[in-house]
Amino acid sequence: MKKSKSVLLSTPYILWMLLFTLIPLGVMGYYALTDPDTGGFTLNNLRDLGLFLPTLGTSVWYSVISAGICLLLGYPVAYFIAHRSAVTQKILYMLVMLPMCMSFLLRTLAWVGLLETNGIINILLGKVGIGSVEIIGTSGAVILGMVYNYLPYMILPLYAVIVKIDNRLIEAAEDLGCNGTQVFARVVLPLSMPGILSGITMVFVPAVSTFYISQKLGGAETMLIGDVIEKQFKTSNNPNMGAALSLLLMLMVLVCTGIMNRFGGEDEEGGVVV
Amino acid sequence: MKKTNRILTVVIFAFLYIPMLVLVVASFNTGKDLTVFEGFTFDQYKALFQDEDLLTLLGNSLLISILSTAIATAFGTLSAVGIHNLNPKLRKTVMGLTNIPMTNPDIVTGISLSLLFVFVGSTLLQQKESLNFWTLLIAHITFNLPYVILNVMPKLKQMNPALQDAAMDLGCTPVQSFFKVTIHEIMPGIVSGAIMAFTMSLDDFVISYFVSGNGFLTLPVEIYSYTKKPMQPRVYAMFTLLFLLIFVLMVTMNLLQLRADRKKTVKQAKSVTAGQKVFRRVCAGVCAAAIVLGCGWLIVSTRQDKITLNVMNWGQNIADGSDGTMDIIAAFEEAYPDIDVNYTTYDSNESLYAKLAGGGLTVDLIIPSDYMIARLRQENMLLPLNFDNIPNYKFVQEEFKNTDYDPNNEYSVPYTWGTVGILYNSKYVDEADVTGWELLWNEKYKGKILQFDNSRDAFGVAQFLSGISINTTNENELKQVSKKLAEQNPLVRQYVMDQIYGIMEGENAWIAPYYAGDCMMMMDANPDLRFYLPQEQGFNLFIDAMCIPTCSENKEAAEKFINFLCQPEISGANMDYICYASPIEGARDYMDEYLAESEVIYPEQSILDKGVSYLYLPPEINRLMDNLFLEVRISGNQPEETEEEGSALPVILTLAGLGAAAIFLFLPKRKRK
């Protein structure tokens, strides 16, 4: 009896989520199928999406590269943290999390100051006598911004998984004659797969939809899909086209995370392990 | 292996912390620039605590995040209990629903919520201000809820159900058993959920950016619009203080936890409950503070007998008291103590139009340019002014009356006028190359050229160069112009509006077309900058004028503000800061001499005669220009030019395919479980 009553507690939540997540997506779909000027039904917005596919491609490409770099940099760090004493682990974990709590706008602006043509890095390089390098405005700068902003999202889930790996399994593998590389490839890596996938998703999704990073660190040739969407809403006053683009972006992300989930571990029900 | 890991870890931590160090150092800098350290000072901290606007914004951010966290934590915990007891199939579905805001990109969540709010508020309920404090709060609660649920659910799963039964056997009602037993068992989940929700909410920019109106802004949204000129260093001071605060909080939290862990192993249950009691009190305190704060704010905001005048102006387009100029808004508020000015900015006529047409805002006074006034007037988005309240209109010079955009002087009162020319850095640009607009297409300066980030001005530049009228409505001509702009795209470093200041002053780019007054301000900051007006090819001559949009709620107060700004001495003092020419008779006499005599601000009449004004264009031409300009902007990504008009079918098929794939990928999984 008690159970059936407490079930009612979930009703307001279900209603809330329907009202503020599903219905808004429906409204977005409605906008995507309406003409900005007349308000009538149209497929023009969907047709024009074709124009933006290369831009979407660029965004996906940048974020895949960023996620890859984050994985390559983040894994050793997570592994290192997971093999410290309990107290050191806590401290390092906190140090990884701390940047995530600080304004990402200001931190990205700091990179602008670092990378500018006459920025800090170039001033230092000039003093050493190397001369200046053009970083800002290139795709490299945008990817650097993505890696910088989302690296903690990779390290934390990786750490959460690696720290749980039972040391006895590694010892057993060693006893059975595995060398270091084999232990890593056959035991550690497969066991950290859920963390890897969750980390990749957590880097990929915000990176593919960013507009701030490319606006600040990118140049004329690094327009991303997030910029286009933001422009449709904030300057071109074409929310209908913007809604269509958002729909495309959402489906694309859904398919990507779906593939991830498919290959990923079964132990979700909480996919996020920050 | 281990050694390389250690080195890599150190490098990564340096990578994560160096940018923050840059900001912290900048907060002690006497200069304004991030890159040059001029001297050590604590002045930024003093300035921070005197800056009411900044503190209000910080307060807003804290209020929203504390309130939304408190509500989401209470609501989410109860819901989690309910969800936990649902039958497995339903539970899966609800968890799927919970995952939507987590897996969706922020931008999609923000946009869909803002569309819902505007659709319901403006279209269905005919509300004027449909994006406000409440919509922001709802949005924050919505994206905070999943964090709480996802943290509490695992703890509920781990809990031994016998505990609850035991409590009920001993005579507890279900509610009592929840508060006496369950809540203690799931406390760690609740706390970590609340902490995550709080940090996410405090730092959220993307969702807030789309769902907030101009009445209630949070700190990150405002920081985003602070792009003009180098950012005020007091913002860095705030960053440093917040950094310290969060650092101390985290350290204490970890220390408390460590101590609790140790005690647990040594002394068992008793001391644990003591620790938990302290913790519970802290939580209760935070919740109570949030509620008191929230109620307090509501009382203050509703009881306020001051009228709020919402002014929306170009960035850096009013004297604000810095560098020894007059603080116009403060002076106005002093003259009219019952009016409180809420001042926000936009960076182009087009973004102002999008804000107004997008709905959801209350704006009482705007200062668009001529062609935008004509457009707003044509689309019935302006209110006629009551000139009885604007006696100072008599000071407006005759040549600014009976204009094309407002032929009967009903809707607007001029604010400034000026020209669009080329700003270049004489240190790097060869004077012989400065012959006209073609300078912006000069291969020699590839990567050092900036261009306008709004369609009308960017098209204007290319139109003057190609000898096409800037007011053409001929589709082929417009396409020709956009081709010209696409040719320029590989040479352009960035498309900018307000950001131009830092880039040009810091010599990171050398050539840019921009508005004369702003150019004058940049020339003040960097003496190597020069301004050139291509007289032979023609240039844009514009007037910015004050208007009252139809969404205004305080028309009379807005008219008082207009009247105030038309006083010659006020207008003159204002121009001293914004460096434009005043259309007010006698204002020039109140300006600094070097500005009043400047050729950049007040060119000779013979030169002015060659200027051309933007005129009203029909909506479909505006749309076409916007679309063509966007194509120019993304042309860097295009493999090659494709001329054909595609049909809707392939894209729809792709979309359907993506949708089907998404469903396919998620469905079987559910069945398996």
Image (spheres, helix red, strand yellow):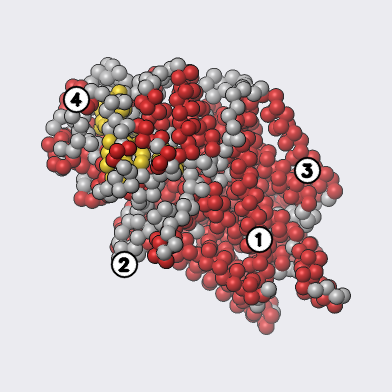
Between the C-alphas of marks 1 and 3, the distance is 27 Å
Q: CA distance from mark 3 to mark 2?
A: 58 Å
Left or right relative to B380: residue A190: right
Q: Secondary structure at mark 4?
A: helix
Cα distance between the residues tagged 4 and 3: 70 Å
Q: Are marks 2 and 4 on the same chain?
A: yes
User: Between marks 2 and 1, how big is the CA–CA gap?
Assistant: 39 Å
Q: Residue at x 15, y 37 (%)?
A: B597
Q: Is residue A59 above or below residue B201?
A: above
Q: Same chain for marks 1 and 4? A: no
Residue B207 % position (x, y): 54, 44
Give the SS element for disc 3: helix
Are the residues under badges 1 and 3 in a single subunit? no
Q: In this rendered view, identify the residue nearer to me: A237 or A172.
A: A172
Labels 3 and 2 positioned on one and the same chain? yes
Q: Which mark is residue B40?
A: 2
Q: Nearer the viewer, mark 2 or mark 1?
A: 1
The residue under label 1 is A72
Cα separation, mark 2 vs mark 4, equals: 50 Å
Query: In the image as oriented, which residue stretches furthest toward the front?
Result: B432
- Using the image, name the chain to which the residue with label 1 belongs: A
Residue designated by label 4: B606
Compared with B353, A57 (above or below) is below
CA separation, marks 1 and 4? 65 Å
User: What element does badge 1 sit on?
Assistant: helix
Disc number for residue B665: 3
**For marks 4 and 3 on the same chain, the one whose residue lies earlier in the sequence:** 4
At which x and y percent is residue B537? 31, 26
